[in-house]
Amino acid sequence: MPVTERVRLTVNGGVVEVTADPATPLLSVLRNQLGLMGSRFGCGMGLCGACFVQLDGAVVPSCDTPLRAAQGRTVRTVEGLSADGALHRVQQAILDGQAAQCGFCISGIVVRAAALLDEQPSPDAATVAAALDRNLCRCGAQRRIVAAVVAAARREP
Amino acid sequence: MSVHGGPVVAGAALPRDVVVNPSLATWVGVGDDGAIEIRVGKVELGQGIVTALAQVAAEELDVPVSQLRMLPANTGTGPDEGLTAGSTSVADAGSALRVVCANVRALFVAAAARRWLVLPEEVTVVDGHLCTVAGDRCTTFGALAAAVDLRTPARADVTPKDPRTYRLVGSSAARLDLPDKVSGAARYIADLRLPGQLFGRVVRPPSPGARLITVDAEVVGSVAVDVVRDGSFLGVVGADEAVVVSAAERLRRAATWAEHDRLPDEDDLATFLTGGPHEAIPVVADEGPRMPAVRTLRARYTRPFLAHASIAPSCGVARWEPDGSVSIWSHTQGVHRLRDAVARALDLPSTTVTVQHVENAGCYGHNAADDAAFDAVLLARGTPGRPVQVQWSRRDELAWAPFGPAMVVDVEAGLGASGSVVSWSFDVWSQGHNSRPGYAGVPGLLAGAHLAGAPPLPAAADPPTRTGGGTVRNAVPVYDLPGRRITGHRLLDSPIRSSALRALGAHHNVFAIESFMDELAAAVGADPLEHRLRHLPDERARAVLTTAAEAADWGDPSPDGVARGIGLARYKDRGAYCAVVAEVEARTDIRVRRLTLAVDVGRVVNPDGVRMQIEGGAVQATSWTLKERVRFDRSRVTSDDWESYPILRFSEVPPVSVHVIDRPDRPSVGAGEAAQGPTAAALANAVAAAVGVRVRDLPLTPEAVVAAIEAAAP
Ligand code: FES
Ligand code: FES
């Protein structure tokens, strides 16, 4: 049996303790132990962005981040971006612009774009696109997504 | 997304899907909470079909969309509407649902009238409430449900609404599925957690045709997983997903396989595709030259294999019931087709297999959805009563899902003294474009070929030419050209599995035809736009072409290294017209500055839906055309991650503007597959104009441009 350990971390504002092999990908812990399905499995190799989360504010692929790397740290997933049922402004702008087709890429994009707006309050389209270059979208919704993020920046956070 | 809204005439024949599924109860029910449950056989692939169909149902029933519950396609309870594929799905399902819902509304109106002892004409339905015209009595669908028996066939003499009175259909409705997808709710098949669910992973062979020699199941160690082996089919099942994934990885490393060097030379696919044996597909028999040619031009165009490359790996869930029946959850494009294929593969009666649809990311044609479902069926066999969820790895998704076939076109044209085309011969070679479940009389499920004693899967077939064909889709130019001979050649044997990728053969055929039109224009010193118009009597085609050209400032001077190219087609010869102008900058790399499209999809029902489909199609085709190529050596597919199979990234996606020409007097046709061919051609023509040499082999990478420049050097 792999060695399991108790690992404590903060997820979306709450402290959680999970018992798992510390080498388990954070994505698997979020989905299977914490029931947070918003972070999607797209590649498991850190190459598509579908599983992006914020770890102490930095955007990382949770598929490629072992649980042990999150120990004692703060994880924010797409579920943690909306507060009290109100969507994050990036989420709302994507809905308003109907800026998605299948939507599978959207969680990771929202996580990445929200981090961008924390750093840069009013990015232009080229800046948004460059920031999203590690997020893949196969449906061709990129231009609408970029426009939505630019529009989101103009809203009150 | 457009919904066919032509008049349904009283007494007219019922739509095909209603003839196949006549009982109203198959389509519509009233839930205990009063919600109206709508069952359709079409499935959400990210194209918004469920929202479009909800609008149709709400429109005919006169209820708000919020009062509907759209249920997923299910072979046990819902209608059989075949595949959700091609661009006609909404048209087919929409016309069926109109008739069904008009019938249901009429039955509820009659029941209210009976209850109140008034005439049906005195009952109206407004916003989900059935009321007398006088307004003195009102009730709801829920309250009347017990008085209405929907287990009755739809009647052709119940007239749906006149589309001119529509309030909902025709407006751009917000997608019903997007709130979940944007908030990160559990919505996709990989998010399913059924009671008692286990996880499974398949250890695929390292290469097509490889056979499993040995595997030491002990390598999984003492962890709680079961190893399943049947011939060359190898898998693991267990309760903890992460443990199952690592056990599968250990098994993969421990297994030894016999591999063959049977794959073609990836740098010379033309020799492979033209080598045969082939099935000849005559499209236009030799018409003979009308006038003598003073000059003959010929060219060969090729495209590599392309991956569907869904962002989500395929996934399936299956549970064997103690009575020997099987329940399946799948993101298949056709629940009934998958049911029949699984039943056939296991030699079970179809009635013992139930398939329910669950969403996944976009598939863009026949990807591994059905294969993953069958994997789950095989891995769940040993644990009756417990569902097993199988998710593919990214590597398997890119290496084992069927590919869009590689293709070769040889085209030759004679030019008369005036510079007009006097003869046209066109040969296209390809593998088949259809190996969906049930094709060629076999189940067509990947694992089926890996089981002990199983024969390999037969080569892909093509859809019939009369329904659009596969290899020969859009092989007939939209232009009026004399002296034509057009023939397809489908390869009858290949070690590489291929199937339907959006637009099928149209992507490559239009790329070839439209590239060659530019080469012909250049040969006679004509402007590409004028040269096309000279051979183009079709008014609707002329309109999209000139609209796109004007909107893109065709003919205006552009800076050095920047150029425009144009492409045109009518999808499947009878679908949407689409013209594209691409503006590219080609120096050390190729940058698309913008795409300008004009489309004519007949009557425009949902302008934003059309724009969304066209934009998505153009962007995906830009990715195929500029970047994509399935790579392999003589035994293995090697492009199995996002680095070896790169697709277009955010900063590479150009602005896309779409001009929709409304034709209120013409039937609506789909928009999802109209843009791919013309986009490829416009890009190729723009690159040729920018760098001065023609690249005839896709993808149009900087390396391909350099190679073409070197080849052209004296
Ligand atoms: S799933 Fe983590 S980056 Fe693709
Ligand atoms: S919307 Fe489908 S992958 Fe982005």
Image (cartoon, rainbow, N blue to C red):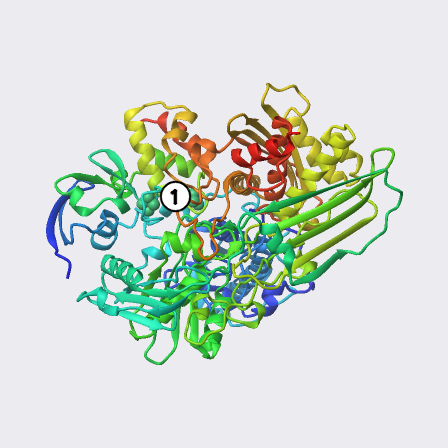
Q: Residue at x 20, y 54 (%)?
A: A33
Instruction: From the top left corner, tell me how far across and down residue B195 is, in percent.
Output: 27, 66
Q: Mark 1 points at which residue?
A: A105
Specify the subunit that label 1 lies on: A
* Residue A17 picture location, percent across and down: 12, 49
- Relative to the observer, which residue lies in front, A81 or A29? A29
Relative placement, left or right, of B371 versus B624 is left
Q: Can residue B72 be seen in this view?
A: no
In the orientation shown, which residue stands out farthest toward the front?
B714
Viewer can see residue B283: yes
In-image side of B228 versus B260 (left or right): left
The answer to whether the residue bearing label 1 lies less than 8 angstroms from the nearest atom of ligand 2 is yes
Query: Could you tell me which residue is drawn at 42 percent across and 69 percent down?
Result: B450
Q: In which quarter of the image is the N terminus of chain A?
A: bottom left
Q: In the image as oriented, which residue stretches furthest toward the right?
A: B291
| Nearer-the-camera pick, B273 or B512 | B273
Name the residue rendered at 71%, 44% in the picture.
B665
Task: Say which residue appears at 25% left-offset and 58% top-offset.
Answer: B246
